[in-house]
Image (tube, rainbow, N blue to C red):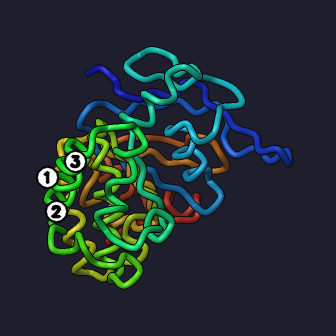
Amino acid sequence: MSSLLQARDLGYRYPDGIVALQGLSFELAPGERLGLVGPNGAGKSTLLLLLTGVLTPSEGALLLDGEPVTPGRLAELRRRVGIVFQHSDDMLFTSRVSDDVAFGPRQTRLSPEETATRVDEALSAVGAEELRDRVPQHLSGGEKRRVALASALALRPEALLLDEPTSDLDPRGRRELRALLEELALATLVASHDLEFVLALCPRVLLLDGGRRVTSGPSRKVLGDEALMLAHGLERPH
């Protein structure tokens, strides 16, 4: 299967000298759901920022459709790969839900008509049409998560990256989010400490620790290895 996103010996060093990632290689295929797991400080959030062009690799290469992502392709990368941050409030900053969802399409200079279509489409996809005129700051955690997801979907990405997507959700919210993500025909990379959610949603996982790839493989095999989980600061999910 061809890859949509590919990291090849990817590395990143922060300006203060801290090495966040080293020699990381993996692929995300079109339509695949991949879990990204590891202890705090493993490099998960840094990897998501590299995959969306927010950060530039210190070494190695990021490929999109098999071709390197050069500075001239960053706009294409950001259009085709959406991200939903851990804290939904980081993506909600206007006084009306529909304006937050419209922000991305407006930045790409789409027409008002096309922007309105994208907003309607995205809100419908996450089941949040009734929230369009609400004030984002007054929404529940689950509602905010849906709106943040709609904001990413409004650009019609081919891949979706989620950083700790269940962090502010109750059990019902987690079930609803899982069902929603299963319905989306998108490549999905889920970085999370919620290993039960990852196990239920993602057929394959990538385990990071100390900025390096430890292993990858079928979720049940990797996450079910109790000794492996404990060795890397995690617990085997039920």
Given residues 226 and 145, the one toward you in this image is 145
Q: Is residue 235 visible?
A: no
Q: At label 3, which amino acid type do we have?
A: Arg
Q: What residue is pinned by disc 1?
A: 183
Residue 216's x, y, as percent?
43, 41
Q: Are marks 3 and 2 in contact (CB under 8 Å)?
A: no
Residue 179 percent coordinates (x, y): 16, 62
Packing grade of label 3 (10 A; few <14, some 14-19, many >=20) is many
- Residue at horizontal 46%, vertical 65%? 193
User: Which secondary structure, mark 1?
Assistant: helix
Taking the view exactly as shown, the residue that stands out farthest to the right is 16
x then y, percent, for residue 89: 47, 71
Q: Quick check: 60 left or right of 115?
A: right
**Looking at the picture, which amino acid does disc 1 mark?**
Glu
Secondary structure under the numbered disc 3 in the rendered image = helix
The alpha-carbon separation of the residues under discs 2 and 1 comes to 6 Å
Examine the image and state in which quarter residue 159 appears: top left
Q: Which residue is mark 2?
A: 179
Q: Residue 118, which numbered label?
A: 3
Q: Are marks 2 and 1 in contact (CB under 8 Å)?
A: yes
Which amino acid does the dot numbered 2 rest on? Answer: Ala
Which marked residue is nearer to the observer: mark 3 or mark 2? 3
Which one is nearer the viewer's eye here, 14 or 224? 14
